[in-house]
Amino acid sequence: MDKQDYLERMYSIVNTDDFKQAPRDPTPTIQRKSNKIVTTLENLNILSKEQAKSMRCYNSVSPRMYGNPKIHKENFPMRPIVSDVQGPTCELSKYIAQILTDAYDQNNTYFVKDSFDFSMKVNNIEIPSDYVVISLDVINLFGNISKELVLEAIESNWNKIEEVCNIPKEYFKEIITFLLESGYFIFDGNFYLQLFGCIMGSRLSPILSLYVMDFLKLRMKNVQFHS
């Protein structure tokens, strides 16, 4: 794949309704808002002075987007990756992600740690002769998770989250909203805002996807289908 082909493939991703080109670098604004949240958490005695100091950022750099080709698929579509190392929300995202990880119930019916765990779960299952096994895949999982679904999943699981979190529920949801709405990156010299979905590369996206998928599966379980 030459550079021109790479750029065309990447621009086919950013030139969609999910992204919008920003007129300027949003890093200073997002950094200021992120630091304000950290200060609020410190004033609420949720963060210690030392924790707050380590989470504030003053020399942030814009996250950068690059693409990895999916070589196992036809025409090698690009997987967009955003590296937020030294990004303005990096430490705050890590902090919130850790809270959600600590609260997440890995013993729930749907959780599979990895392929080895899956193998252990299905190794001795006998499939009836008139049954078939299917595997379902979510296309662009992170990019298709809406803010509304995330907040519903947080609300649904708040009884577990509040056991490991001293942040008031509504403020916790405000922080989540801020982090979701602060997805942005630089690509080919231009800045882009992500308008929809959880950004690929964020420390928060993997754990949010677990909450959302569990929430959707539980909701579908309660839906009655009629032939």
Image (tube, rainbow, N blue to C red):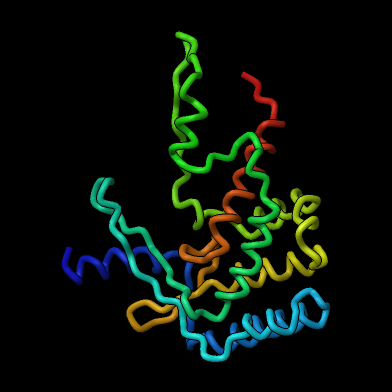
| Up-down relation of residue 159 to residue 24 (above or below) | above
* Residue at 71% from the left image edge and 79% from the top image edge: 37
Quadrant of the image for the N terminus?
Answer: bottom left
Quarter location, residue 181? bottom right
Residue 21 visible? The answer is no
Side of 19 where 150 appears, left or right: right
Where is residue 106 shown, x and y percent of the image?
63, 43
Name the residue furthest left: 2
* Residue at 75% from the left image edge and 76% from the top image edge: 47
Frontmost residue, 63 versus 163 = 163
* Residue at 45% from the left image edge and 77% from the top image edge: 63
Frontmost residue, 71 versus 95 = 95
Name the residue furthest front: 50
| Up-down relation of residue 79 to residue 122 (above or below) | below
* Residue at 23% from the left image edge and 50% from the top image edge: 75
Where is residue 197 shown, x and y percent of the image?
54, 60
Quadrant of the image for the C terminus?
Answer: top right
Residue 147 visible? The answer is yes
Frontmost residue, 57 versus 116 = 116
| Up-down relation of residue 190 to residue 94 (above or below) | below
Where is residue 160 shown, x and y percent of the image?
77, 50
Frontmost residue, 131 versus 5 = 131
